[in-house]
């Protein structure tokens, strides 16, 4: 996709040229740039904003179904990567590092260390909130909606699965079942048994906290987009009243 606001076309003899200020949009499929990640998608939305922010009225159909699905796919992938980071780092921090390695942390240190598993989630959420300022025209609205919908769907599914998995683990972790599992660790069976029973009361509270945070990360960008859009519409109506008065 290529946008150009000034084009000069000459014949081979160089004697005739045609200048125009019309918007030129080329749709050569071989040259269409396809965003690969969340940062690429936000950068492309910024390009749409540059055009639509100047009053260019581009039909929503210009963003084809294929391009719309590209933004949706990037949103899903972003949510998936955030879920994978949580799946690996979350148990290590909350069920090993805090109770056994760093049990005497003060509240401030615990909050700082506890935020590490959520860094990717927090950063991507802030990036998604940042694009709310570009929610101005047909193309930007359509692309932002597709991106946020894909990410929200992925995060909501992972929040549900995370809670269900830890709920099942908590329910089946009777002392007898824990001891049967502990025997797989040989000489460390007793240590594993008492260690797991020590962290068992924290399984559901921590899983609930993480699921709620992912839920907030899925919903908050949508809220920032629509609240800022409502505010911008209110300012437009207020300015129109001032002018008409």
Image: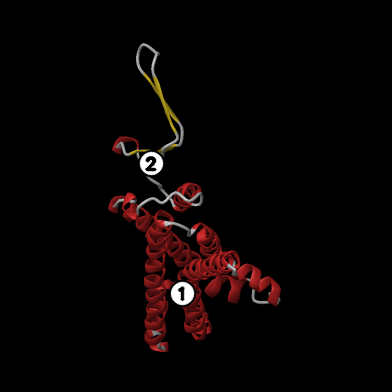
Establish if 231 lies above or below 52. Answer: below
Q: Is residue 143 left or right of residue 55?
A: left
Establish if 98 lies above or below 64. Answer: below
Establish if 231 lies above or below 138. Answer: below
Quick one: label 2, few (<14), some, or many (20+) residues within 10 Å? few
- The residue sitting at 45% across, 70% down in the picture is 218
Establish if 228 lies above or below 10. Answer: below
The structure's colour scheme is secondary structure
Residue carrying label 2: 33
Tell me which numbered mark, 1 or 2, is placed earlier along the sequence.
2
- Give 27 or 149, whichever is nearer the viewer: 27
* Element at label 2: loop
Q: Is residue 105 left or right of residue 8?
A: right
The x and y percentages for residue 183 are: 40, 77
Residue carrying label 1: 215
The x and y percentages for residue 22 are: 41, 37
- Give 149 or 100, whichever is nearer the viewer: 149
């Amino acid at each position: 996709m290529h946008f150009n606001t000034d084009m000069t076309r000459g014949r081979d003899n160089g004697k005739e040229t045609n200048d125009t200020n019309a918007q030129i949009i080329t749709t050569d499929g071989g040259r269409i740039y396809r965003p690969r990640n969340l940062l690429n998608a936000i950068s492309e939305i910024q390009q749409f904003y540059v055009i639509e922010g100047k009053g260019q009225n581009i039909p929503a159909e210009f963003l084809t179904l294929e391009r719309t699905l590209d933004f949706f796919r990037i949103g899903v992938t972003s949510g998936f990567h955030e879920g994978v980071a949580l799946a690996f780092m979350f148990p290590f921090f909350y069920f090993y590092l805090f109770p056994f390695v760093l049990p005497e942390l003060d509240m401030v240190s615990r909050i700082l260390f506890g935020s590490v598993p959520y860094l990717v989630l927090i950063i991507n959420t802030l990036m998604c909130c940042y694009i709310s300022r570009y929610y101005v025209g047909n193309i930007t609205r359509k692309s932002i909606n597709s991106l946020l919908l894909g990410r929200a769907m992925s995060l909501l599914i992972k929040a549900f699965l995370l809670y269900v998995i830890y709920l099942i683990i908590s329910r089946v972790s009777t002392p007898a079942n824990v001891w049967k599992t502990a025997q797989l660790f040989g000489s460390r069976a007793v240590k594993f048994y008492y260690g797991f029973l020590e962290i068992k009361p924290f399984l559901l509270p921590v899983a609930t906290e993480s699921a709620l945070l992912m839920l907030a990360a899925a919903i908050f960008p949508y809220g920032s987009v629509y609240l800022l859009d409502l505010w911008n519409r209110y300012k437009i109506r207020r300015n129109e009243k001032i002018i008409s008065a």
